[in-house]
Image: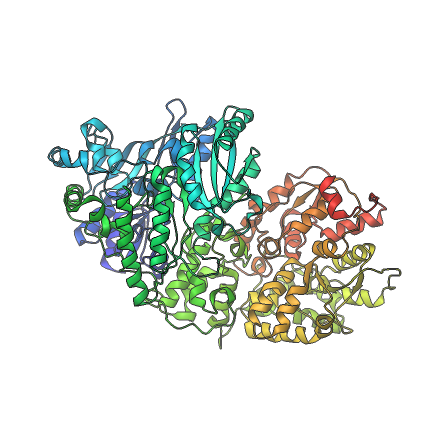
Amino acid sequence: MTDLEAELRAAVRGEVRFDTTARALTTMDASNYRRVPLGVVAPRDADDVVAALGVCRERGVPVVARGGGTSIAGQATGTGVVLDFTRHMNRVLALDPGARTAVVQPGLVLDRLQEAAAPHGLRFGPDPSTHSRCTLGGMIGNNSCGSHSVAWGTTADNVRELAVVTARGRRLRLGPGWAGAPDGLRALVEGELARLRTGFPELPRRISGYALDALLPENGAEVARSFCGSEGTLGVLTEAVVRLVESPRARALAVLGYADESAAAEAAAGLLPYRPLTVEGMAADLVPSPAALPRGGAWLFVEAGGESEAEARARAEAVRRAADVVDALVVTDPGGQRALWRIREDASGTATRMPDGTEAWPGWEDCAVPPARLGAYLRDFRALLTAHGLRGTPYGHFGDGCIHVRIDFDLLTGKGVARFRAFSEELAGLVVAHGGSLSGEHGDGQARAELLPRMYGAGTVALFERAKAVWDPDDLLNPGMLVRPHPLDANLRFAPLPRRPVDVAFGYPADGGDFAAAVRRCVGVAKCRTATVGGPAVMCPSFRATGEEEHSTRGRARLLHEMLAGEVITGGWRSTEVRDALDLCLSCKGCRSDCPVGVDMATYKAEFLHHHYAGRRRPAAHHSMGRLPEWLRAVDRTRTAPLVNALAAVPPLARLGKRLGGIAAEREIPRLAPRTFSRWWRGRRPAAGARGPAVVLWPDTFTEHLTPSVGRAAVRVLEAAGLRVTLPPGRRPRVCCGLTYVSTGQLDRARAVMRRTLDLMAPVLESGTPVVVLEPSCAAALRTDLPELLGDDPRARRLASRVLTFAEGLDRLAPGWIPPRLDRPAAGQTHCHQHAVLGDAADRRLRAAAGLTGELSGGCCGLAGNFGFERGHYAVSAACAEEQLLPAVREAPEGAVILADGFSCRTQLEQLGGVRGRHLAEVLAQALADGTDARPAPGEGWRDSGRTR
């Protein structure tokens, strides 16, 4: 333990962590920059902040305040002590609906404030796209804005008072009329009145530099407002009184389509007289699928509010009529609006990749110009990009003239970094020429502070330095930001990464086979740190269960980044820090779809475990559950399933077996079927009269040995739909997707199993017969893991392309079949792998056609294959189930069908909820057996009827 760590532990009541994991997790924010801190302190209150600052001041150690770590200019990183406010100082202390104010702590996530204010019809006006994880302290530090700033202004516009601690431990209460001003600040301002009145451009999104003009007498000498946007360089925020605004009772969203982004930009300022709540812009480059949007190459998202839906719609329609558009859409349905806004909010992650997959980076993320000049600025900006051979897609707050853009800088080579600098210098000049601000929302940090003299001139920047000295004479707080800044091309996060691709097992086709490039996908926007998810979203269940950064997708990606860098984490693939963080990853694959940049932590975890345990003893669970298909086939060959079930029912033997197998003591061992699915198949009487297309029904391990009833039901339904069902070739099918080996990182074994499967499936691949897979996790493994592990075998991709889920098989191969009509509510959960890899559109249509109403929940059941059975995982597994699945089932209407297509989901429901979930095939087969039927209209198929009934 270092002396600094010991002194901090003695001085503060909150956590003090100088361990490798804590330091590695805070080396980066969402910017291009990386700094390695000495340690992290999580203060419990303002007294802890004073004490920590005292220790650091005595030792000359710099201090950086950190909230959600989503800053894009590098200001949430540092080389000294990081103060993490998200752990303890994260509450709403008071809320006064009459005064429309709230008292908050700096670590409070914005969405939690919105939730507290909503019952009173109020909200906090600024709302960055990271609202589900950014903190009020970070918003005040950066003077954040968000999409509604055209109506409600910046964070500075919505701050009443601030409680701060100076670097020398003085507690100040900042407000209007010089309230809380440190000694010397008023004299400094009064000596520079002329400069302050003439040296600051007038535009709604001027965030760059210190807001010293807020201290002018005609502006009320607003010390709190002047403090906003200071990026933690003047004092440490401990409490804030913020203003709340009335939230419209109803909203309507007008989505306006334009030919291109310049046309949209030119139109934006003209819509401001209609007093919209938002005027957001984005181009087609950032939209993976524009199906939900009106025609056009770029769009404005213009939101209107009102006391009623009719009033909101009328205002949105007025905007639409006033706009000269290619096409337009007005949406009043809240669900439809949320879906459209998600497209816009995800742009911050989507923009990190060019359409061809090339990486793109921040650095010039949020310049702002007067709104009336936005169109001209964008044309000049595009020309500058072309001149430097760069690409980027602008989007953002068009109504405020604020543009976000990620650019395909090459930050890995000296030549590329030199181009980054040259472009930055020229663009700064272009922004200033248009009367703009280098930062319009995210702050200057290291990315732009070096160029502030171009915007303000040397005299005003010198004034910033004098102001910093008044507040922080020892330069203790976030040095190198805003004044005396680090060079914009120093401390780049990519510098310590290996230059040659790392030898890996998976193919990483989207990243050129480079594991480092795959890890670089995580840019830190931290959507995985969302405390709650709605709808079908899954990511990141382990973080929501523990609240620990190391159990978020971002945290794990940070640790892998540092593992590759080798500076903080020095153990490489043998790292215990990475192993421990990945241990609670459920491999749910939710990040593969929900992460805006497609980080795939399940694959990274399998890769890491493969290397970590190479030539070493593996945990018992890797053998007992990772090799589950082998054990179950052995039981089948010896016909000892009844014996195994009997032994597992004896408590002492069950306890011994679970201890030896690394299985959680709290778990019940599932019973094996006395007769496997394939044995039933061989003994059944072949169906007569089926003349439709042939399908191969995949006998996955779970269906084959544990729930053959699902397979039997699927055969019944598929044949009722007229399909000719067969099984893979061979008397005892030994096909296997390899999932259990992949999830435990036994990738050599997984590849051997997969190659054997491809050999067995050769006749099917030759015939082109579709393959219906009932277990979603197995279908996902065949679609993704198989071709990514066996990229050198063309048969892998061919098999992957043949795989259909149960609903997809009926959808594509029997579109004229009408399922039995149940007319009952349904509850349950969409399998996380289905959500992430397969999609559930066909399932939704099939359920609708069968009269099964209601939405299935999102999230993850928490069992997740072997995860929930492994020793030490039970508590997290149960917490994940309690988040969405179990409440959804408890709240289901009487008589509801409980759907769970995955074996893990059904097992979790049974063991934790005492509820039997059923595969959709079982539900339909039972309805067929009961004689339930629905006759189609002539020429009508279930895909059509499911939409109209």
User: Residue 105: in sight, yes or no?
Assistant: no
Q: Which quarter of the picture shows residue 588?
A: bottom right
- The percent position of residue 539, horizontal first and vertical second, equals 51, 51
Give the position of the C terminus as an image quadrant: top right
Q: Is 703 located above or below residue 899 in the figure?
A: below
For the residue pair 589 and 525, the one nearer the viewer reads as: 525
For the residue pair 768 and 592, the one nearer the viewer reads as: 768
User: Residue 179: in sight, yes or no?
Assistant: yes
User: What is the tally of numbered marks visible in this picture?
Assistant: 0
Q: Which quarter of the picture shows residue 563?
A: bottom left
Task: Give the side of residue 825 with respect to residue 51, left or right.
Answer: right
Q: Is 173 located above or below residue 916 in the figure?
A: above
- The percent position of residue 498, horizontal first and vertical second, equals 37, 70
Q: For the point 77% across and 42% down, which residue is it?
A: 822
Q: Which quarter of the picture shows residue 122?
A: top left
Q: For the point 68% across and 64% down, which residue is it?
A: 802
Q: Is 762 located above or below residue 709 in the figure?
A: below
Give the position of the N terminus as an image quadrant: bottom left
Task: Give the side of residue 912 with respect to residue 171, left or right.
Answer: right
The figure's colour scheme reads rainbow
Task: Give the side of residue 866 with respect to residue 97, left or right.
Answer: right
- The percent position of residue 785, horizontal first and vertical second, equals 58, 66
Task: Give the side of residue 117 with respect to residue 388, left or right.
Answer: right
- The percent position of residue 695, horizontal first and vertical second, equals 76, 63
For the residue pair 474 and 280, the one nearer the viewer reads as: 280
Q: Please, which residue is most extreme toward the top here?
A: 98
